[in-house]
Amino acid sequence: MTSRRFPEASAVSVGGFVRDDTPTHEIDRREAVLESLAGTVRELIDATIRTTVDDDEVHRVREDVAALVARLRADQLPGPAGVRYNGEVRVWNWGNAVVGAANAVAPPLRVVQTPAGCHADLVLGAAYEGPPGLVHGGVSAMLLDHIMGVTASAMRRTTFTGTLTTRYRRGTPLGPLRLEASIVREEGRKVFVAGSISDADGVTVEADGVFIQPAGMGDAPRE
């Protein structure tokens, strides 16, 4: 197996985004490597929650995991990953709590953009449970905030959440779910967005949000 270290690159922060001149092909390669690791760690989280092995085996596994953590910490960032982009306007946000390729806590979410808005299909397992067998309400709000924010930005401008109002119509079961969002209207720097979470039987959570483009900020980097 070939070992390749992620290249050091010059980085300059502009409007909260970090300009990083790492070539796109290196970003794509590194992202695939980290995404694979995060997927395995995500499986570890699920296994940790659901395991029924005896205490001695749990202790042995903990020691093995601690050793792996030490290996990864041998070379790491001094803080969070942030949002970065290069001269080819390739954007990466590997630590994001919802879509970060390197974040095992993030559900494997892929947002699809269409002229009508955005949608995403995902499966939430044991790590996202609140009430028995149901998705935690805070997780639902987080997912809606993300997909509605992506919809508001339209991948061409920077927007931040001003308000987010959620209505929980019924419990959202763990398992396959669909997120949807669309722009309702725009007023100056305000973008009004509607969103929902559905299972096979229909909508479980609805939301309305106001997203604001900060004064003085230009278009956001986009892929």
Image (cartoon, rainbow, N blue to C red):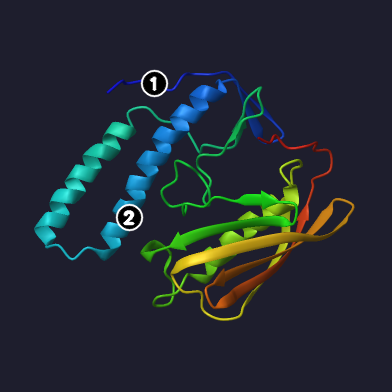
Quarter of the image containing the C terminus?
top right
Q: Residues within 10 Å of mark 2 (few under 14, many from 20)?
A: some
Q: Pointer 1: what residue?
A: 5
Q: Nearer the viewer, residue 59 or 47?
A: 47
Quadrant location of residue 18?
A: top right
Residue 193 visible within the image:
yes
Identify the mark nearer the N-term, 1 or 2: 1
Quarter of the image containing the N terminus?
top left
| Residue lying furthest bottom | 170
**At label 2, which amino acid type do we have?**
Ile
Q: Nearer the viewer, residue 83 or 215?
A: 83
> Residue at coordinates 66% horizontally, 22% vertically from top-left?
87
In the image, taking residue 15 as reference, residue 216 lies left or right, namely right
Q: Pointer 2: what residue?
A: 45
Query: Between marks 1 and 2, how big is the CA–CA gap?
Result: 27 Å
**At label 1, which amino acid type do we have?**
Arg
In the image, taking residue 158 as reference, residue 48 lies left or right, namely left
Find residue 27 and report its horizontal and vertical position in percent. 51, 27
